[in-house]
Image (cartoon, rainbow, N blue to C red):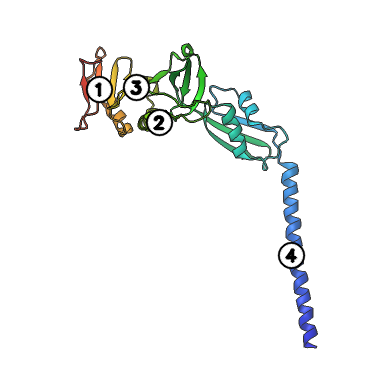
Amino acid sequence: MARRRNSSRRRRGSFGFLYKLLSILVICGAVVAAVTLFFRVDHVEILGEQRYTEEQIREASAIENGDNLYLLNKNTVAGNIREALPYIEEIRINRRLPDTLVIEIKECGTPFALVQDGSAWLISPKGMLVDQLDPSAAADCGMISGCQLLAPTVGTSIALATEYASQQESLLELMAALEEADMLEDVDGIRLDDLSAIRMDYLGRFTVKMPYGADYPMKLKMLRQAMESGKVQDNMTGTFDMTRESGRIYLDQSTR
């Protein structure tokens, strides 16, 4: 008798577990069905565009009206946009219920140009090759010289030939610091031909000489302070030397 009662309890317990499991599966299925049926893309809102139009970004995203808002792979969408539109540096994608996808982009700052083999390769401040132009079309860009790109391709990070490996790291750090300091527009060129120091052509009338591997945010801060000190007159030209062991900045007006 006791055995029958225990067996009956076990059966009831098994049925109870199966009932709970089936209920959970039904609820999950209902949720998935609701998401699939009701949350579809009807609107795409694009923020932050400058070089590209909303239509270009929407086309590059490969998003279609009616795509499921939750089943969209945001990494795939961002990858599609970056591949087609290389000036775009950062992408944030958010869902706004019930039917809107918000794509917020940040385009790269003013690119530099490096002329090689009859082409001007435009390089973003973060070191991405964003365009290939005729050299005449890049006349307004700051020029990078004294190095050579290795197998350049638009949409990829720059790679300098092996013999310029140490210069490449300093070049990338300097460009990033210039962007952070909002000084890109002031730079006419960056020269890597001198292995003892990196040289920057500045404001059309100065050369700025800095060590490779320096703390470039600090060097640029010192440069800005010098320019704002009132000691540098509008008619002055010369070289700001930041390579001396003292760590101070010197303006040599006799050298250009």
Q: Name the residue under label 1.
A: 240
**Three-letter amino acid code of the residue under disc 4:** Lys
The residue beneath circle 3 is 191
- x and y, in percent, of residue 165 in the image: 38, 32
Q: Given this view, does label 4 or label 3 mark the residue nearer the observer?
A: 3
Mark 1 vs 2: CB contact within 8 A: no
Few, some or many residues within 10 Å of mark 3 (<14, 14–19, 20+)? some
Q: Which of 178 and 138 is in front in this view?
A: 138
Residue 162 marker = 2
Q: Is mark 4 on a helix, strand or loop?
A: helix
Residue at image location 63% in from the left, 24% down from the top: 55
- N-term mark: 4 or 3: 4
Looking at the picture, does residue 137 appear above or below residue 242?
above
Real-space Cα separation, disc 1 to disc 2, in angstroms:
29 Å
Percent across and percent down for residue 140 are 43, 14
103 left or right of 192? Answer: right
Mark 2 or 3, closer to the camera: 2
Instruction: Measure the C-alpha gap from mark 4 to mark 3.
Output: 71 Å
Residue at image position (76%, 78%) is 9
Instruction: Write down the residue under mark 4.
Output: 20
